[in-house]
Image (cartoon, helix red, strand yellow):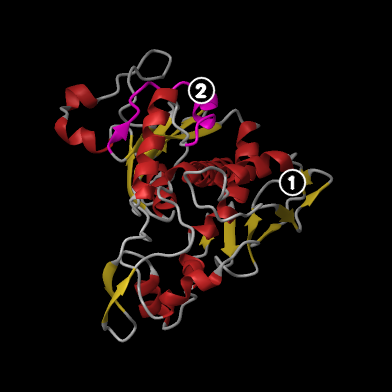
């Protein structure tokens, strides 16, 4: 299947469907001799896994990763890292009604039109179940980046109309990870959790936004003209299920600003007094923290009855069954971190290899 490979020097290939036997991937380009902590990889998988709290899907998956190759005695060999995560808790009968009918705003219709065949069980390849492989690869990339002094942190800063507008500091990571919604405020977390519970009770879903801050990135990463660093980050984020928007630095707020307000003035240390650029200028990192946001739509599968069509283009009624997230955003935090880490590591190695 075209489109299942990501990256240039650091390349991730993923495989598997939501209700298949397993999902997994092959990660290439990781330098040899890097110490890998499997427990840290599993921790990120646990942050993404279903069934972790009352406000996410109750599908029960241990998401235990099995490394098949590329790591020996705790260190990378420089060869492809193969890994596998078995699917353990499929309830395919919950999706029988989708064998013919298409969920509104879901990939059911487009996959059928593209391939003429689809796995309707849990969405098959279009399911967010695929992202478990990204988290494994990203967790490895994060460990490599840490050895270069680079840290990747993502957190929720909006669910529906409720926003967190505080200033990010690394110690707030512990706060965000202590809440069910992964927001850096206990007060805001309570409001967001209540909103998600209300939405779930109503048989509906809701969207939100994740902010990611990458600290320690050296100046000079990025490949103009078409391979700008923020362009690759945008591609990475928009490849995640349910993502509908990406903005870096001031983002869309920049349209209402003047250049005199928006320009990031330099200090004699080579830093800037503000960071409206989000750490990237001209497609190249400038040494400031890379700061971007990712917008997620409401999950398409809802428990309310909706009008749709079947494969014969006949009008039918459909309501969701089974176990689904009322809001995918809290579980998407480690996915955003993973994709960001893969991009930064890829460009770090490209810089070392070509400049």
Snapshot quadrant of residue 185: top left
Which is more toward the observer, 295 or 95? 95
Mark 2 surroundings: few (<14), some (14-19) or many (≥20) residues within 10 A: few
Q: CA distance from mark 2 to mark 1?
A: 30 Å
Q: Residue 133's x, y, as percent?
A: 59, 55
User: What residue is at 59 percent from the left and 65 percent from the top?
Assistant: 90
Which mark's residue is nearer the viewer, 2 or 1?
A: 2
Which is more toward the observer, 252 or 326? 326
Q: Which disc number belongs to residue 23?
A: none
Up/down of 344 relative to 88, above or below: above
The residue to which callout 2 is attached is 170
User: What residue is at 34 percent from the left and 47 percent from the top?
Assistant: 199
Segment colored magenta: 161-180
Horizontal arrangement in the rendering, residue 26 relative to residue 35 (left or right): left
Horizontal arrangement in the rendering, residue 64 relative to residue 266 (left or right): right
Q: Which disc number belongs to residue 32?
A: 1
């Amino acid at each position: 299947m075209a489109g299942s490979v990501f990256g240039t020097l650091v390349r991730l290939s993923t495989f598997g469907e939501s209700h298949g036997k397993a999902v997994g991937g092959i990660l290439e380009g990781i330098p040899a001799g890097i110490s890998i902590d499997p427990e840290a990889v599993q921790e990120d998988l646990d942050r993404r896994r279903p069934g972790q709290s009352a406000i996410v899907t109750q599908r029960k998956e241990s998401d235990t990763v099995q490394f098949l190759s590329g790591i020996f005695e705790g260190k990378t060999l420089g060869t492809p890292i193969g890994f596998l995560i078995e699917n353990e808790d499929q309830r395919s009968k919950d999706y029988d009604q989708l064998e013919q009918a298409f969920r509104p705003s879901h990939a059911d219709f487009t996959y059928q039109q593209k391939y003429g065949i689809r796995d309707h069980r849990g969405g098959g390849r279009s399911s967010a179940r695929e992202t478990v492989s990204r988290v494994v690869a990203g967790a490895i990339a994060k460990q490599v980046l840490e050895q270069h002094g680079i840290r990747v942190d993502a957190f929720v800063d909006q669910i529906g109309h409720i926003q967190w507008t505080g200033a990010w500091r690394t110690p707030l990571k512990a706060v965000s990870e202590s809440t069910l919604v992964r927001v850096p405020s206990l007060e805001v977390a309570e409001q967001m959790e209540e909103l998600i519970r209300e939405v779930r009770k109503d048989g509906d879903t809701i969207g939100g936004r994740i902010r990611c801050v990458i600290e320690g990135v050296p100046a000079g990463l990025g490949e103009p003209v078409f391979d700008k660093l923020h362009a690759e980050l945008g591609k990475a984020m928009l490849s995640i299920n349910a993502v509908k928007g990406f903005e870096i630095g001031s983002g869309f707020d920049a349209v209402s600003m003047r250049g005199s307000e928006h320009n990031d003035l330099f200090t004699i240390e080579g830093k800037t007094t503000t960071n409206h650029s989000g750490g990237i200028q001209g497609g190249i990192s400038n040494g400031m923290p890379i700061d971007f946001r990712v917008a997620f739509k409401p999950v398409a599968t809802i428990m309310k009855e909706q009008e749709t069509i079947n494969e014969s283009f006949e009008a039918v009624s459909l309501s969701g069954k089974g176990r689904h997230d009322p809001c995918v955003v809290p579980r998407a935090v480690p996915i955003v971190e993973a994709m960001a880490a893969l991009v930064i590591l890829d460009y770090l190695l490209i810089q070392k290899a070509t400049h």
